Amino acid sequence: MCLQTEREPLEAAAKSQAYEEVPKPSPDDVLVGHPDSLDAFWKAHPEFLWGPCVLGALVKGGTMIPGVAAYLDAHGMEPYGFLNALHYTAFALILSYAVHAFVIVHAVPTLKIQSKLGYNKEPRAMIARSNAAICTELVFAVFPLAPASSSWLQFWASVAVLAVFWDAWFFAAHKWAHENKWAYRTFHKTHHLNKHPNCFGAYFVTYQSHILLEQAVVLVACIAGLPRDAFSFYMYLGTLGTLFEHCGYELGSLKLPLVPLTLGHVTSALSFYAVGFLEGVNAAEHDWHHEKFTTNYALSFKYLDKLFGSYHPGRQPGTGLTAHASKKDE
Ligand SMILES: [Zn+2]
Ligand SMILES: [Zn+2]
């Protein structure tokens, strides 16, 4: 979950020039028959309700074990709290709709990554599962977190260490979930039912996969002493990042009003540690992972995929938006 890095501004996108062929929305046939309301989804997948309750009870019970309780006390660590968890959960739910609406209103066709397919404006089945997955984040209420950072240096260092740790964990677990047939079927196949990413695809996951790739990582980081302000910052910003990564568009070159800055300038500044070998991933790369399955396993940075030979730069947005488009971009 890293905010997409800025790409070369696309002249065509900036001018929002006319294109010859109107792409049709992706039909998402593979999702036909999936529950398309939250009530129906919870009925079909009660693990999204009892799963976080069990995890929460285990964490709460664990923190009451005398040795663990003494360790937490010694480091001033306390539960994140229900209100904080509720605040983040509500933010993430609203943000997923906000980014979806932003894409529909502001993203021009020349920024579309799989440009021959239109954006699905009503992915109801994806919305139901995404909402249910985000609601499970309430489990963070019982996760023990260290006091807020005592300096800006500690704050940014904690954010950067969490980003690198989470990315490495995600890379290893994600690669395994693709290379092991049982793991793919059990954990990850659902996330790949849609080969044409959409904002609500970011949290279109099984609860097992959500524990493995998110909640377990957070729990380990919390026990290691993650300051609560660094956790909040990373989660709020990271949620925006993962929604951008799955939105189907490269939004980095969109110009902001009044100032000579693009959206990419702002998002890059907020994750300024993503430089050098920690170069951040962008939407086109993760989009390619959904389209082709076998590359770009990392969450935030490119270096692990480059190191293990699984890196691909993805499609150039807007390619093939002409009536005489060839198959060159395949
Ligand atoms: Zn995958
Ligand atoms: Zn994905």
Image: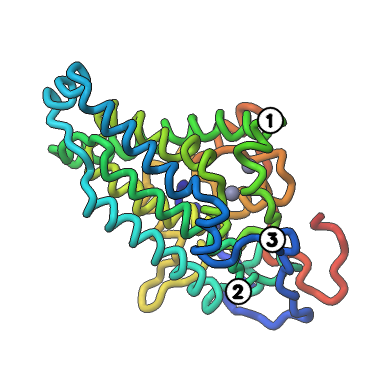
Task: Say left or right for 278 vs 117.
Answer: left
For badge 2, the amino acid type reads Lys
- Residue lying farthest to the top in this orientation: 67
Label 3 belongs to which residue?
Answer: 31
- Where in the figure is residue 56, as x and y percent of width and height? 33, 38
Relative to residue 307, is residue 115 depicted above or below?
Answer: below
Relative to residue 91, is residue 313 depicted above or below?
Answer: above
- Where in the figure is residue 226, as x and y percent of width and height? 26, 34
- Where in the figure is residue 143, as x and y percent of width and height? 28, 37
Relative to residue 172, is residue 95 depicted above or below?
Answer: below
Label 2 belongs to which residue?
Answer: 121
Tell me the element at label 2: loop
Tell me the element at label 3: helix
Nearer the observer, 50 or 195: 50
For badge 1, the amino acid type reads Trp
Label 2 beta carbon within 8 A of ligand 2: no
Q: Label 1 crowding class (10 Å Cα cut-off): few <14, some 14-19, many 20+?
A: few
Of pointers 2 and 3, the one earlier in the residue sequence: 3
Color style of the picture: rainbow
Residue appearing at x 46%, y 47% in the figure: 2
Residue appearing at x 57%, y 54% in the figure: 44
Residue appearing at x 17%, y 32% in the figure: 77
Tell me the element at label 1: helix
Mark seen at residue 182: 1
**3D distance between C-alphas at marks 2 and 3:** 14 Å
Of pointers 2 and 1, the one earlier in the residue sequence: 2
Q: Label 2 crowding class (10 Å Cα cut-off): few <14, some 14-19, many 20+?
A: some
Nearer the observer, 80 or 202: 80
Nearer the observer, 301 or 82: 82
- Where in the figure is residue 292, as x and y percent of width and height? 74, 46
For badge 3, the amino acid type reads Leu
